[in-house]
Amino acid sequence: MTEKLESAQDVFLGKINRICNKFGLNNVMAQLYAVLYLSNKPLSLTDMVERLKISKGSVSVNIRALERYNAVRRVWIKGSRRDYYEAEQDIYKVIFDRIKSMAGSRLSEFEDMINSSCRAVDTVVPADSEDEESIKVFKRRLDTLKNLHHKAQSLFELFDASALTMLKKE
């Protein structure tokens, strides 16, 4: 790769870092995906280490995560014993699948928090009328959170269906 082309890619990689940091995402995974996405051929772990100037361990761990997310895949290169990787070229699918996974996980955590809290408050035996009132308030607030979770889940399902329709049109 020429120095000018590498420099142009570095601009892109730098921007990816800033975007990922703002969203709290792993920038090494984003850089690995970007390097593979911009490459005209599959790359080995060693190629990625040399390109990004990061440890082989970091590349290995993060490339496995990208494989689990179906963002990259291992490919066979005739005559080589190394593992080579290429990026999923449908970037819409990669981004959407990642957003979907993160949102689903957060909604699940939120639901678990509400359910755990409901079970806990249901075991409380009030000692006096003040406790009874506090329990009623707690349950009302948990009901508000249940309603919020339901609306967020519905919104997510609507987004999921809309995004799927949009992707199929592409």
Image (cartoon, rainbow, N blue to C red):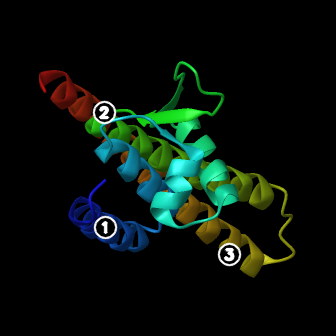
Residue occupied by mark 3 = 134
Q: Amino acid at mark 1?
A: Asp
Q: Amino acid at mark 3?
A: Ser
- N-terminal of the pair, mark 1 or mark 2, is 1
Q: Which mark is residue 110?
A: none
Secondary structure state at the residue bearing disc 1 = helix
Secondary structure state at the residue bearing disc 3 = helix
Q: Quadrant of the C terminus?
A: top left
Residue occupied by mark 2 = 89
Residue occupied by mark 1 = 10
Answer whether labels 1 and 2 touch (C-beta < 8 Å): no
Task: Pinpoint residue 81: horizontal percent, then vertical percent.
Answer: 66, 28
Estimate the spatial distance between the alpha carbons at disc 3 and disc 1, rounded to whole Å: 57 Å
- N-terminal of the pair, mark 3 or mark 1, is 1
Q: Residues within 10 Å of mark 3 (few under 14, many from 20)?
A: few
- N-terminal of the pair, mark 3 or mark 2, is 2
